[in-house]
Amino acid sequence: MPPGVVLCIMGPTASGKTALAERIAAELPVELVSVDSALVYRGMDIGTAKPATPHRLVDIADPSEPYSAARFRDDALREIDAIRATGRTPLLVGGTMLYFRALFRGLSALPPADPAVRAEIAERGERLGAEALHAELARIDPAAAARIHPNDPQRVQRALEVWQLTGKPISSLQQGGAGSPHDHRKLAVAPADRAELHRRIEVRLTAMLERGFLDEVARLRARGDLSPDLPALRAVGYRQLWRHLEGHGTLDEAGRRAVFATRQLAKRQLTWLRKEPGVEWLDSGREGWLDDGVDWARYATMPVR
């Protein structure tokens, strides 16, 4: 099948991406594909704001099972082809920018995880602190350290692991492989007013707690086979409530930490989007923005004459 148009709605958490995607799906012949590293996991529904409208690549992994950007790329390309075979247009929606990057640019051949090396780095992080690990990364790979925030321990530790396994900086290995063959039309959705985005993040967390988010985390913890070090449980909100259930601070304190972590995540997402070429922007804080988003999708899928 020859390459075709793929719509991509990107943006920070709580920006309105899902609302727009569902509105477009109600009016145009599209099918939705999730680009979210937490929505892939079963049993994580409230804290991920799992959408009501069907999306592909939702509930496809157990929380005990790591899900990678490489696996996402393979899954997404397969789903894109399957949707196009029905005559509909794929609409990818989400905020996991690493997944979008893997799809757009491809992935380099990085070494697989080494449990012993990873455990040693994690122990060093517990003993010395996140800032010390980030400083270590800055010495061996300044480019990666500039791109990875000190409060993103998973990526800092992975970069150090790659260095220890290969002797090469991860930034030199992440030049990318073959990109996607499709024509990606990219729309970034976010309120122009940062304060509005922060307000939405707080409102959404409050609503999640009222719907039973804490009980959801308690059920995951009660399984007995999950660890807070797993990628699934490092998702914002989940790791803060897990720590609360372990006796670290009150629920209010966990909520404040979750809001702060979500704001930091949104900041990183916006930074990535501003650097991504070919992105159009839509202010989801102004009146009529959903109509404008539908018009964008309608125009983007029109055949070129």
Image (cartoon, rainbow, N blue to C red):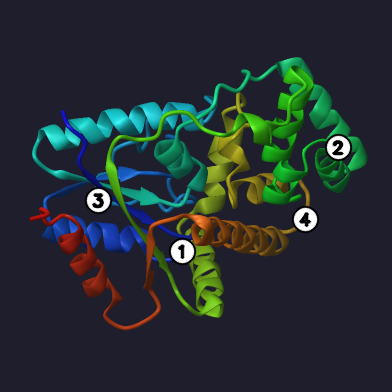
The kind of residue on which mark 3 rests is Thr
Residue for badge 3: 53
Kind of element beneath mark 2: helix
Residue for badge 4: 249
Instruction: Tell me if residue 152 can be seen.
Output: yes
Q: CA distance from mark 2 to mark 4?
A: 19 Å
Instruction: Tell me if residue 44 can be seen.
Output: no
Q: CA distance from mark 2 to mark 3?
A: 41 Å
**For residue 147, above or below residue 63:** below
**For residue 26, above or below residue 86:** below
Quadrant containing the C terminus is bottom left
Kind of element beneath mark 1: loop
Kind of element beneath mark 4: loop
**Quarter occupied by residue 1:** top left
Q: CA distance from mark 1 to mark 2?
A: 31 Å
Residue for badge 1: 14
Earlier residue among tags 2 and 3: 3
**Quarter occupied by residue 178:** top left
Taking depth in this image into account, of 62 and 81 the one nearest to the observer is 81
